[in-house]
Image (spheres, helix red, strand yellow):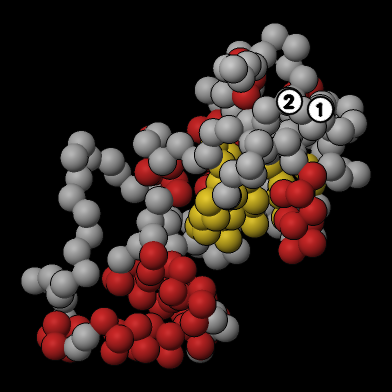
Amino acid sequence: MKKHVARNTLSFSCSKTMKYLRTPKDIWKELSSEFTFTVDACASDANHLLPRYWTQYDDGLQHDWTGELVYCHPMFDFRIAKWVEKAYSSRCVTVLLLPAATHTRYFHRYIYRNPRCEIRFLEKPKRGFRFGPDDGTDDDPDRLGYIRPLMIVVFWNNGPIFPPRSITHGERKTSARPRRDDTPEEATSGPASRFMSLTSLAATVGISRATVRDWMLCSDLKTVRRQLLVLRNEQRGTT
């Protein structure tokens, strides 16, 4: 017997009732235990998760996010790129719940290989993600949930904001081998030695080895080193 899959299990924007809007409870429980959020940037009067929140009537995109610890779960529609760009360009920490749409322009311009951006791909529960009704009541357990891939994106923008990457069609993947523009020291040292060099530099600015390892998963060696040098110079009060 074929299972009936409701249209809004694939896209929220196609649901005329706009019912399934609330962040899944298990996802929110984990995030709220990790982060001390100050504002829910994309909420409604019914589904806000924090005492302080912005709705469509006091558009969060128009607010200054500087110094905030923002939670943002936007509607999964054409405006996602604007929320991602806002998070990217704001001097604050922003945590977004997004579709894992790694083919999109906003993913490649603002998220991918950004050393200040952390990507956490979420494992789909057996019957999908439970977003639940807008009023906070429990979703029907017999109903198939949202089945497309999701990710948590964290922008750690406490320091300088770099311009977005330019996108070129068919751009080549970064190679782990030494490049011609590497310094002689880098060209003769192996990946382990270069990682140790980065972690030593990171230790001077209070960045853990695990964070350096995460950055190197989504960026290249020179970009990570440049970011660490910027942070070190900021702490020393140099330019």
- Note whether residue 86 is visible: no
Q: Is residue 132 left or right of residue 189?
A: right
Q: Nearer the viewer, residue 99 or 130?
A: 130
Q: Residue furthest top?
A: 16
Q: Quadrant of the N terminus?
A: top right
Q: Is residue 138 above or below residue 7?
A: below
Kind of residue at badge 2: Arg
Q: Residue furthest left?
A: 180
Q: x, y percentage for residue 175?
A: 19, 64
Q: Quadrant of residue 212?
A: bottom left
Q: Is residue 206 left or right of residue 141?
A: left
Q: Residue at point 70% right, 9% down?
A: 16
Q: x, y percentage for residue 195?
A: 35, 83
Query: In the image, which disc is placed on residue 140?
Result: 1
Q: Residue furthest front?
A: 1
Residue at disc 2, secondary structure: loop
Q: Residue at point 43% right, 67% down?
A: 215
Q: Residue at point 57% right, 49% down?
A: 123
Q: Distance between the Cα atoms at labels 1 and 2? A: 5 Å
Q: Nearer the viewer, residue 46 or 158?
A: 46
Q: Is residue 154 above or below residue 2?
A: below
Structural crowding at the residue carrying mark 2, measured as other residues with C-alpha within 10 Å and reported as few (<14), some (14–19) or many (≥20): some
Q: Return the residue at label 2.
A: 143
Q: Residue at point 76% right, 49% down?
A: 26
Q: Quadrant of residue 18?
A: top right
Kind of residue at badge 1: Asp
Circles 1, 2 touching at the beta carbon (< 8 Å): yes
